[in-house]
Amino acid sequence: MVTPWETAMQDLTAVVAVGILISGLDDLFVDLCYYGSELYRAVFRGRYPSVTEEQLSAEPEQAIAVMIPAWQEHAVIAQMLRNTIRTVDYENFDIFVGTYPNDEATMLAVAAVAELEPRVHRIVCPHEGPTNKADCLNWIIEGIRHYDKTTGKGIKIIMLHDSEDMVHPLSFKLMNHLIPRVPMVQIPVVPFESDYGDFTAGTYLDEFAESHLKDMVVRERLSGMVPSAGVGTGFSRDAIEELAVVHKGQIFNVCTFTEDYDLAFRLKAIGKRSILLQHFVERTQVVRTGWPFHRERLKRVRELVGTREYFPSKFKDAVRQKARWTLGIVFHGWQQRGWEGNLALRYMVWRDRKTLATNSVNMLGYLLLAEAAADAIMGRHSTAGLFPLHIAAGSWVWSVVYADSLLLTNRCLQRLATLRRITSWPQALLSIPRIIWGNVVNFFAVAKATRLFLCAKFSGQKLVWAKTAHAFPTEAQLLGYKRKLGDLLLDSRMVTLAHLNEALNAQKERRRLLGDILVDLGYVSEADVVATLAKQLKAEAWTIDPDKLDPEAMDHISEEACREHLMIVVDVQAHPLVVAAADVLDARMRKWLDANLGCPYRLVLSGRRSIVDAIDRLKRGRGPIASVIQLPLARQAGIDQLQ
């Protein structure tokens, strides 16, 4: 006899099974659209030529303004600004950071960088924070207009970034290539890989990979628009000014928590196109094969041009961030935008908003599985056929559950395939069990967003900027975008793999810099090494002419300091003073110069041998001088990692 409890469970199972089927078929449709369009593009690939790095570099640079809203970001903003200026392969850009008068720590951190970097500008909002990002961004645009008017620079492109972003070196060149032909360009966001056991942060990697490598591609091709991710987004200045006219100066919607998402709809409403740009660049790397051969070989790898950043690793932080996204995309979007646009656009909006139902259905499914497992453990058998889920074998519900299982298998394969394009096999395989944890996080985020929205609606209380805890990448992660010297020399065909292997083996024995060893072996000149490193570090390469050395150079920096930090003044008449250094990133050297030089200076990159020879020449006759400078082991190891 079937009990009332089992009847209720059967009915609930049927509802959950149908809900999962509808969502699964929706996802399957997107998969089919993606692979169908990719097949079409593969057949007619001649119609879709890919731009090369050389072509990007040959194009004239338009002026770019980068907007960064900052509220309580003093811990990361300075690092982000310095790293962006140092690594981005572009010259004609300025960074505008929006700060608040009651956030003195962030203002001081930005001011410290702006003092040394003229391309960094601090914009102070006229009222205390936190307001919301949209309000901050609107004031940054006012600052950009004022700067453009006073300098006459003629800014043509405006970009969005956050204070924890690691900007890809080629991203500005891609924006320069496409804008203003395309009014809005979004490049993929790629979260940093987390530890294997960190499932919360790992869910961001899984979701962004599938969204930005597949789902958003379909969205663009069907509806003609993609929403901005808030980072790595570029806009035409003309399109932004058109929005200002239409919305009376309120370019970004201050009545939503996802102003970036909303802006794409505003652009679509005035007939402006937005695209997601997936651009891969090929890189030469030296890889070591595993056991039993342990050989090194050259490998061409494909690197996605995307914005890298950290996402929350704690459950509570992830729920808070995703609740903010749900508030803006689902509730504010539904409330303010309704169901505008053509059928394709409405379909994509429905996919955004279906999370309200699907996350609840998924959680109910997990609870039903848990209840069925408890039944099996306790020896209670229901009317199930092959498994105790209150489903009669051969019934229509059983058929739906079977179809759900096939769709889940497809979902796992899609995650695996998209993750494998940008990450390692272990991370790709872990994306499968992380599906469950991601659904749990999303369920609690939707529940929190629903509660906040209803409380604000009925109480009239205004919601404020819910800040997410940010962290900036470590030096090891930053080096992922700073290619090794050996790889760069191989790419430029200055050395062969055999030459590089010989130098690497010698480096293990001598504990010296790779560039010095290659010069010693006669495979490259020191000038070649300096020129390659200067391009990588975005520094000026300087050739020291021994016949033009000024004896007054030692009046500015003592011989001991020159030898300790491997630096020397090479132009005493210039203002600021020109100081050549073997390592322009050396923090100890910069600290010494700031404390002891007593005048403004400009660092340029020169070879170690050239600097030592210049010191020897200037100090010849003052006693025995060591002709080879050995760096402290710790510092040399750090430079080895970079080079």
Image (cartoon, rainbow, N blue to C red):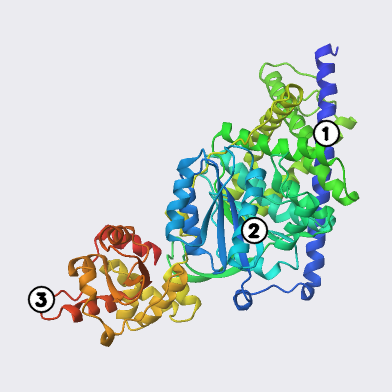
Q: Quadrant of the N terminus?
A: top right
Image location (x, y in percent) of residue 60: 63, 76
Looking at the rendered structure, the number of numbered marks drawn on it comes to: 3
What amino acid type should be assigned to the residue bearing mark 1? Gly
What amino acid type should be assigned to the residue bearing mark 3? Pro
Q: For the point 80% across and 14% down, which residue is it?
A: 5
As helix, strand or loop, the secondary structure at mark 2 comes to helix
Asked which quadrant contains residue 279, the reply is bottom right
Most foreground residue, 345 or 587: 587
Image location (x, y in percent) of residue 468: 57, 39
Asked which quadrant contains residue 177, the reply is bottom right
Q: Please give left or right for residue 172 compared with residue 385 in the image.
A: left
Residue receiving disc 1 = 19
Q: Kindly indicate whether the residue at mark 1 contacts the one at mark 3 (C-beta within 8 angstroms).
A: no
Residue receiving disc 2 = 145
Local packing at callout 2 (Cα closer than 10 Å; few below 14, some 14-19, many 20+) is some
From the viewer's perspective, is residue 579 above or below residue 407? below
Label whose residue precedes the other's in the sequence (2 or 1): 1
Q: Please give left or right for residue 37 compared with residue 416 in the image.
A: right
- The outermost residue toward the bottom is 547
Image location (x, y in percent) of residue 622: 10, 77
Residue receiving disc 3 = 624
As helix, strand or loop, the secondary structure at mark 3 comes to loop
Most foreground residue, 239 or 434: 239
Most foreground residue, 247 or 205: 247
Local packing at callout 1 (Cα closer than 10 Å; few below 14, some 14-19, many 20+) is some
Local packing at callout 3 (Cα closer than 10 Å; few below 14, some 14-19, many 20+) is few
Q: Please give left or right for residue 606 compared with residue 178 in the image.
A: left
Name the mark nearer the viewer: 2 or 3: 2
Marks 2/3: CA–CA distance = 60 Å
